[in-house]
């Protein structure tokens, strides 16, 4: 008969693996801790520790020898670079010469994208004064279920660009539809405005009263001499002087509105969720 006694690995991990769920692409997760146990009766030195792919080590108390039946702690993080499942290994080498120890690591990166909705387009051609509308879809990837805030920039002068609704919360599976509306302005002419002359440019009232008295005296004298034409001419001169120098206002042109300039424009729709940002470029042609 054969007999034997099982002996634990000299170095072991406190868990069979670490899993990180639902981490936004480009962001770093909170660290998960794992113990490295020394199952021997003597001290063990950890000579090398690495984490592969998109995983990292933030906490490491294994830099000093681990005493018999003691342990040290490692903190592991996950920073996905793309949406979807990702795997890696935590690998350490110790002084027992029993070969590297590995711990499986896994995580899921989450993301969202912005694109034209089914049947929609990312380009539009209009004339000044006409609106443009784009129908877009905000789609989750790998279970993304966060809120996304949307803005639109790049509209030409004399126009506006807005997104409705300005924020959507995705359910991890289905796309949310948003509408981008662009308003433009047609060219127009305005009626010249009237502006009274400054007070300092008007003749004093006493001067006009004196001129009126002299004009009436002259008129009376000329009427007796039957020179009606001269009287009428004098009255006309006074009326013109009154209107130009003090009685009336001077016209100032309104200038009008040139409207939205013709040209090709890029409108940038930006979606943000925490530190994650995604954009879509829309083209607008104004004839």
Image (cartoon, rainbow, N blue to C red):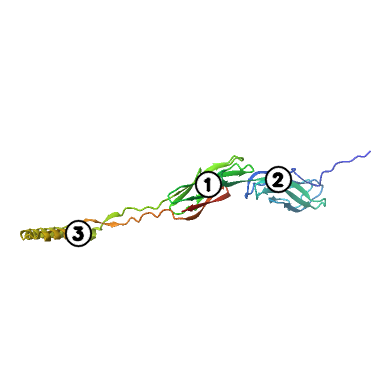
Circle 3 is placed at which residue position? 240
Pick whichever of labels 3 and 2 is earlier in the sequence: 2
Q: Position of residue 199 (x, y in %)?
A: 24, 58
Q: Classify mark 2: helix, strand or loop.
A: strand
Judge from the rendering whether residue 212 lies leftward or rightward of residue 166; answer left or right.
left
**Residue, x 73% and y 44% (percent of image)?**
17
Circle 2 is placed at which residue position? 106
How far apart, in angstroms, are the residues tagged by discs 3 and 2?
A: 93 Å
Q: Position of residue 67 (x, y in %)?
A: 77, 49
Q: Nearer the viewer, residue 276 or 185?
A: 185
Label 1 near label 3: C-beta < 8 Å? Answer: no
Q: Quadrant of the N terminus?
A: top right
Q: Position of residue 152 (x, y in %)?
A: 50, 49
Q: Position of residue 234 (x, y in %)?
A: 14, 60
Identity of the residue furthest to the left in this view? 224
Circle 1 is placed at which residue position? 150
Q: Nearer the viewer, residue 242 or 59?
A: 242
């Amino acid at each position: 008969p054969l007999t034997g006694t099982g002996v634990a690995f000299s170095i072991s991990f406190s868990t069979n693996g670490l899993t990180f769920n639902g981490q936004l692409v480009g962001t770093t997760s909170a660290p998960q801790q794992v113990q490295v146990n020394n199952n021997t009766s003597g001290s063990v030195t950890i000579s090398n520790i690495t984490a592969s792919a998109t995983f990292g080590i933030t906490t490491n108390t294994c830099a000093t020898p681990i005493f018999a039946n003691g342990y040290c702690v490692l903190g592991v993080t996950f920073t996905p670079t793309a949406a979807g499942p990702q795997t890696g290994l935590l690998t350490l080498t110790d002084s027992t010469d029993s070969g590297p120890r590995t711990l499986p690591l896994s995580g899921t990166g989450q993301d969202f994208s912005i694109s034209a909705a089914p049947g929609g387009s990312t380009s539009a051609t209009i004339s000044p004064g006409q609106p443009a509308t784009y129908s877009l879809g905000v789609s989750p990837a790998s279970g993304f279920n966060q809120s996304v805030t949307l803005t639109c920039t790049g509209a030409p002068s004399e126009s506006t660009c807005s997104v409705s609704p300005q924020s959507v919360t995705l359910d991890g599976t289905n796309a949310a539809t948003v509408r981008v509306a662009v308003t433009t302005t047609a060219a127009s002419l305005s009626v010249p405005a009237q502006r009274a002359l400054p007070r300092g440019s008007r003749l004093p009232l006493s001067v006009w009263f004196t001129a009126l008295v002299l004009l009436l005296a002259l008129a009376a004298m000329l009427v007796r001499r039957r020179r009606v034409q001269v009287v009428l001419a004098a009255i006309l001169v006074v009326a013109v002087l009154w209107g130009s120098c003090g009685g009336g206002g001077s016209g100032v042109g309104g200038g009008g509105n040139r409207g939205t300039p013709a040209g090709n424009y890029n409108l940038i729709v930006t979606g943000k969720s925490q530190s994650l940002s995604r954009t879509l470029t829309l083209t607008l042609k104004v004839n």
